[in-house]
Amino acid sequence: MRVFAFLMMVSGAQLAAADPSTYMVLGADKGRISLVGNKGQIDWSFPMAAEVHDLSLLPSGNVLLITGRNTVEERTREGKSVWKYTAKNKKGYQGPIEIHATQRLPNGDTMVAESGNRRIVEVRKDGTVAREIPLTIDNPHPHRDTRLVRRTPLGNYLVSHEGDGVVREYDLDGKVVWTHKLDLAGRPRSGGHGPEGHGTEVYGAWRLANGNTVIGAGNGNRVYEVDQQGKITWVVEQKELPGITLAWVTMVEILPNGNIIIGNCHAGETNPQLIEITRDKKVIWTFKDFKSFGNGLAATQVIGVPEGTIR
């Protein structure tokens, strides 16, 4: 029951600042979902064969995650399913559907991004669709239409379109109200998932309270922040952190004090899988555990960060 006591502690007002020594990492890799401590101790774990690109630990202690190509579930720490949604083909579309993003909303509904169907749905607890939001996609592909999708403080959605290399903000009617197109940052495109791979296949975007947006650039190998006009206001490049090379940047968490936790997938065993840095790019914490997780650790959540962290 340690995880539940830990969650109560984390949500308390007494945690005004992060203490990396108490961090635990929830992650999906090596065919399992696991909650792992800083020293590699496993709190709990259950099998999961699916490719998981998004997960979150809910206040109940259950996990919301992708459990199949077109399926999202809420599961207990023993792996028991207590809620499930399976995406079906929308009218006029008969191809494959993949899910790469899901988020529990404040009203209890669950956001699911359906690649192939090219839409976001908000799903009620009874499995019915409360809202459908169409997506604008230039290069449709059921594996690449979307990666991470997150709600903004104003209630819109930031959608990372991997295949388009674009982040679009949508209102709840599906109107595009903001767009940011990634570029190659002056480097040539190259293939591969490791540090040698470079492109514009974006993974995630998160809106800050000041209106700026943090971009986890996927195989752009960097994390950066842009203002509403698209101007870069802060960036950490692939080889800017001492002794660390960024590969496929996935999940990003922005702490209330401005620190940023970077998910570093496909970077190889010489590099950490997670890195916390200050705004002046000082590394204050790393996580590298190739026993519990492997080189495909894309979906993570750091447990122990302060309340108010954006992820």
Image (cartoon, rainbow, N blue to C red):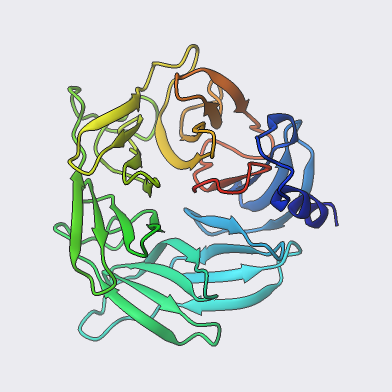
Compared to residue 87, the image places residue 162 above or below, namely above
Compared to residue 241, the image places residue 129 above or below, namely below
Q: Position of residue 310 (x, y in %)?
A: 49, 47
Indicate the quadrant where residue 202 lies.
top left
The extreme left residue here reads 138
Q: Position of residue 288 (x, y in %)?
A: 62, 28
Q: Is residue 1 left or right of residue 221?
A: right
- Residue for point 19% across, 39% down: 230
The extreme right residue here reads 1
Q: Is residue 295 left or right of residue 98?
A: right
* Quarter occupied by the N terminus: bottom right
- Residue for point 56% across, 77% down: 84
Judging depth in this view, the residue of 56 and 279 nearest the camera is 279
Q: Position of residue 67 (x, y in %)?
A: 54, 65
- Residue for point 20% across, 33% down: 231
Q: Is residue 182 left or right of residue 225?
A: left
